[in-house]
Amino acid sequence: MTFTLHGIGVAGGFAIGHAQLYSNDRLEAPHYVLGQDAIEPEVTRFDDAIREVRCECEQLREHLPEGAPAELAAFLDLHRLILNDSMLSQVPKDLIRGTACNAEWALAQQTEALLAQFDSIEDAYLRERRQDIKQVADKVLKALLGHPGQLPVKVSDEPTILVAHDLSPSDMVLFKRSPFAGFITDLGGATSHTAILARSLGIPSVMALHNARTLIQEGDRIIVDGNAGVVIVDPDENILEEYRLRQNEWRLEQQKLKRLKSSPSATLDGLAVELMANIDQPEDVKEALQENAAGIGLFRSEFLFLNRTDLPSEDEQFEAYRKVAKAMKGRPVVIRTLDIGADKSPAWLHADSVNPALGLRAIRLCLAEPPLFLAQLRAILRAGRYGPVRILIPMLASLGELDQVLELIDVAKASLDKDGITYGKDTQIGGMIEVPAAALAAEWFARKLDFLSIGTNDLIQYTLAIDRADDTVAHLYDPLHPGVIQLVAHTLKVCQRLKRPVSVCGEMAGDPRLTRLLLGLGLRSFSMHPAHLMAVKQQVLRSHVASLAPIAGKLARAGRPERIQGYLERLNG
C-alpha cells in the first residue's frame, strides 16, 4: 500500500531506490553496584572505551575519502573535542568513584544531564548540537557494551535509500564510501551537522520523519523528495514515472548550474549583485572558493568558543581569522562577533536566564564581559592586516549599545597601538538587523555604521514571536509574513537612501524563490550557504530589476497572504 511521510527536506533533489534499514537505536545502560576493589578497574574500563572511540575518530579522520567535503574533517574534529571534554571524559569517572556504579550507568547519567542543558537552548542551531553530544556518548556506550556501530555497506548495485533513526557525522564518512542514493532519518533538523553534510555531499535527504524507521520495511521501494521534504513508500507506476521525470530534470538543472560559476553576477539590466558565502569555521572557505563566492558575508565566530571548557585565546582566534582572510585573497571577510547567550552551552559560561532568547546573549553578553569582547576585537583587527576583514555586531537593539561597542573598538585599537601590534586601521564596522526595534530604527544605525546585514532568521522569530525549532509552532514561521517583508523593505530603503551597503545573510538569501523579491526591494548583496550560490545566481542572471521593483513594492504592501502569493508568482513567472 502506498503511503507518504512528511519531514524536513534538508538536501534537495530526488532519489528512488529500495530501503536499507540501519539499526542504531540507543542501547540501554545497565545499572549495578560495584565492590570497592572493582571501582578502579571500572574506571580503567571507561578510559579504554573513550580511547577506543577516539582512535576510531582519528582513523576516520586520517582516511577520509578523496573528494570528501571539508565539513567531514571538521565534524570529526568536533567529536574528538567532545570526547576530550572533561564533562564527558572525566565526570563519569567521578560518578563511578563517588557512587560505586558501573561505567555504562555513569555515562548515561552524565549524558542525560548534558542533554537537559542543551534542551534549554533557545537558538535552533546551538540546540542541534545536543545531537553531537548524544552521538558521541552512544559510541562510547556501544564500546563499553561491545557493540560495533558501523554503517551498513551498500549490498546491491540497485539504487538504495538508507533508513535510520539517526546518523552521526562519523557515520557520514562511511556513507561517503558506500554511495547510497539518499537517506532519511527519524531525528535531526535543518541545522544539524548531518544535514549540513548531506547538503555538502549533494545527497537528497529528508529528516525529522519521526516514525520512518519503524514503518518502512527492508527492501521497500521508496521515493525521497528532498525539495518538498516528502517520502513516498511503495509508489505505484504512475508516481514512479512522474518522479523519474523530475529526477532527470533535476540532474540536468544541476549540471547547468555548474556552468554559471565563472559568469559575472549581474541582472539582465546590468546591475551587479554580490553573492557571498556563510561559513562556520576556517575549513569552510574551500567550498566558498569552489563556488566562486564574492567573499565571506558571515563568519560565525561562536564555533571557536563551543565544545570546550576554556575560552580561546586572542592568538588562537587571530590565527583562525587570519587563515580565512589569507585564503580569500583580497575578497571581503565579514566576521560576526560572539553570538551565544545565557544558554549554558559553553562550559566556561556560568549564566542562567528565564528566557535565554530575550536574555544575556550576543552583544549583550559581550558588553557584560569586556575582557572577552576586547580579546576578540583585537584578534579580528589584527587579522585585518591580511585582507579586507570587517566586524559585524549581532543583535543590536539600541544606539546606547552601539555607542558602547564603538568605544570598546577604540579601546582595542589603542591597546594594539600601545603593544606595537600592526592591525587593519580601516576595518569597517557593521551591525546586524535581527531585532524589530533595530529594523525600525535602521536609519540611526546606518548613519553610525559602515554597513548593515539583515539576519532574517532571528528577525522572523522575534517579529512573529515564535521558535522556529518548536514543532508545535514551526508552521507559523513565515518569511513572507507582511510584517517581516515590511521590516526588510524598510531597512533596504533606508540604506539605499543613505547609500549605505546592506546585505541579507539569513535563510531568505539562499532561497531562490525569494531572490527576485529581494532584488525588487533593492537588495544587491546576498550571503548564504555555499551550496545555494549557483541556484541564486541563476535567478539573478534571469532577472530584470526595473520590471521587478513595482511588483515587489506591491507585494510589500499587499497584506493578505493570498495577495502576497499572487505577487510572488508574478515575480517568479
Image (cartoon, rainbow, N blue to C red):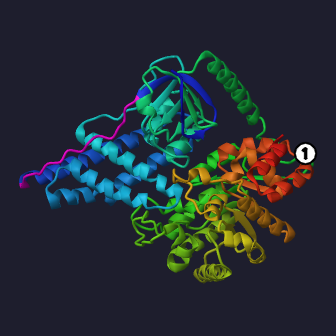
Q: What residue do we see at 68% from left, 47% from top?
A: 289
x then y, percent, for residue 64: 48, 37
Which residue is at the front of the view, 373 or 9? 9
Q: Judge whether 497 appears above or below 320 on screen.
A: below
Image point 48% across, 63% down: which residue?
Answer: 305
Instruction: Judge whether residue 391 can be spotted in this image.
Output: yes
**Horizontal relation, residue 81 to residue 28: left or right:** right
The residue at which mark 1 appears reads as 268
> Is residue 178 shown to the viewer in this render?
no
How would you rate the neighbour count of disc 1 (Cα within 10 Å): few for under 14, some for 14-19, many for 20 or more? few
Residue 251 position within the rendered picture, expressed as x and y whole percent measured from the top left: 69, 28
What amino acid is labelled 1 in the image? Leu
Magenta residues, dominant SS class: loop
* The quarter of the displayed image where residue 68 is located: top right
Q: Is residue 423 magenta?
A: no
Name the residue: 64% across, 37% down.
227
Q: Give the range drawn in magenta.
A: 22-36
Q: Residue, x 50% and y 34% (percent of image)?
A: 184
Residue 143: image location, x then y, percent: 27, 40
Estimate the x, y position of residue 448 in percent, counting from the top left: 75, 78
Residue 478 is left or right of residue 235, and the answer is right
Classify mark 1: helix, strand or loop: loop
Quadrant for the C terminus, please.
top right
Q: In this view, does 130 lie above or below 450?
A: above
Q: Is residue 23 magenta?
A: yes
Residue 283 or residue 387, whichever sits in front = 283
